């Protein structure tokens, strides 16, 4: 137990390497602890496959022995932009607002870059104070611009606030796109029908339809989890990401036909795979997962429906969202 502290994590990592003589490291959880433990792993030349650490700073130190399962935070909303490009009629303009905090800003910046690359016109990209409870002045600016897409990067409270204030101010984008906060039970519970039509990017969902040789399919992986932990158990992306770390090590050892660190490292670096436990993985020279076809959900009739990519689609995305007066 690293007790959720970087110092404890680093000490345990050193013990694992020097006393327990481990060859490979999986984990830990969080970027701050991974930042500390990978410094120890690099010192001893031991590979760390980090399932839940995507802060850029972890991968900007020139390290050779760290690999991420999560793509970088700026990739989270990218699939939403690509999905929007498939709509008919196609949205043309966007406004993006973000809480002034490291994670949401990273998500927002990635979304803005993706929108621009795909040819959308970004009319506004503006920050608001983290923890704000009223951003009606900023949303009034959004209303005046009348964008087709409203992108919001924040947390659960932000998502609730934006939907409520959009209704109050009669702001009617054709598409609401969020980084986080939608796929939390309280979003639909508190908003009721006002939660409808909101989109959000997710890292992985148990309803995806991906096949591999390990579990057969995503459904096969989910059943394996239920067999182990009980029929009521449903894995989230934290669990599937951790499983993925183990699978990546297995695949790399098989490809290298060796457990020698540098051979396994080179094999890891060359992997380009789709897994039942993770949509896709391939690594840049920093060890970051640069593949992004993760899923998008939309609230439809009070349910979370996987709407993108089409290969895993449970239902078609609803676009454009009706105006508030028509709901």
Image: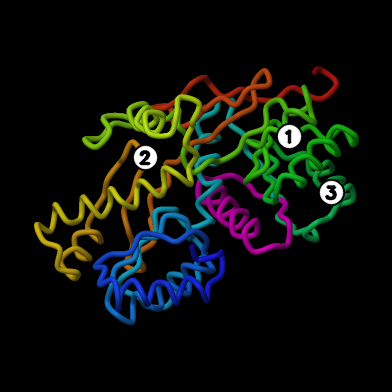
Residue 307 rendering spot, x and y as whole percentages: 52, 27
Crowd class of label 1 (few under 14; some 14 to 19; many from 20; radius 10 Å): some
Residue plotted at (44% across, 77% down): 11
Residue 321 horizontal side relative to residue 33, left or right: right
Residue underneath mark 2: 277
Q: Position of residue 38 (x, y in %)?
A: 40, 72
Q: Which mark is residue 186?
A: 1
Could you tell me how far apart the alpha carbons at marks 1 and 3 are, in whole angstroms? Answer: 28 Å
Q: Quadrant of the C terminus?
A: top right
How far apart are the alpha carbons under marks 2 and 1? Answer: 26 Å
Horizontally, residue 42 falls left or right of residue 294, namely left
Q: Nearer the viewer, residue 324 or 297?
A: 297
Tell me how far mark 3 sits from mark 2, CA to CA. 41 Å
Q: Residue at x 26, y 30 (%)?
A: 216
Is there a contact, CB below 8 Å, between mark 1 and mark 3? no
Mainly helix, strand or loop, the magenta region? helix
Toward the bottom, the furthest residue is 43
Above or below residue 103? Residue 292 is: above
The residue where tag 3 is placed is: 141
Question: Which of the two discs, 1 and 3, labels the residue nearer the N terminus?
Answer: 3
Residue 139 percent location from the top left of the image: 83, 46
Please report the residue visible at 45 percent of the width from the left and 61 percent of the height from the top: 28
**Of the two numbered discs 1 and 3 in the rendering, the one whose residue sits closer to the viewer:** 1
Which comes sooner in the sequence, label 2 or label 1?
Answer: 1
Q: Is residue 240 left or right of residue 298?
A: left
- Of all residues shown, which one is farthest toward the left? 257
Any magenta on residue 110?
yes
């Amino acid at each position: 137990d690293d007790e959720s502290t970087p110092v404890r994590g680093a000490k345990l990592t050193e013990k694992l390497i020097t006393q327990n003589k481990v060859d490979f490291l999986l984990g830990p959880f969080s970027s701050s602890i991974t930042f500390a433990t990978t410094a120890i792993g690099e010192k001893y030349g031991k590979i760390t496959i980090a399932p839940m650490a995507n802060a850029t700073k972890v991968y900007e130190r020139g390290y050779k022995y760290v690999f991420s399962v999560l793509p970088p935070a700026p990739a989270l909303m990218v699939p939403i932009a690509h999905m929007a490009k498939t709509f008919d009629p196609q949205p043309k303009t966007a406004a993006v607002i973000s809480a002034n905090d490291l994670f949401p800003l990273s998500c927002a910046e990635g979304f803005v870059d993706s929108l621009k690359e795909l040819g959308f016109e970004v009319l506004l990209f503006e920050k608001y104070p983290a923890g704000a409870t009223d951003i009606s002045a900023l949303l009034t600016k959004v209303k005046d611009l009348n964008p087709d897409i409203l992108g919001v990067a924040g947390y659960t409270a932000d998502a609730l606030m934006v939907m409520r204030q959009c209704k109050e101010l009669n702001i009617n984008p054709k598409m609401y796109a969020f980084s986080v906060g939608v796929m939390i039970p309280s979003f639909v519970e508190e908003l009721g029908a006002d939660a409808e039509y909101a989109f959000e990017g997710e890292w992985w969902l148990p309803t995806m339809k991906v096949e591999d040789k390990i579990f057969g399919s995503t459904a096969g992986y989910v059943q394996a989890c239920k067999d182990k932990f009980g029929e009521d158990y449903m894995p989230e992306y934290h669990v599937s990401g951790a499983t993925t770390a183990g699978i990546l090590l297995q695949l790399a050892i098989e490809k290298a036909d060796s457990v020698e660190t540098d051979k396994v490292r080179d094999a890891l670096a060359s992997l380009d795979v789709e897994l039942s436990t993770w949509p896709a993985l391939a690594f840049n020279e920093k060890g970051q997962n640069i593949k992004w076809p993760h899923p998008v959900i939309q609230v439809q009739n009070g349910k979370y429906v996987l709407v993108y990519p089409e290969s895993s689609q449970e239902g078609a995305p609803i676009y454009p969202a009706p105006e508030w007066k028509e709901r």
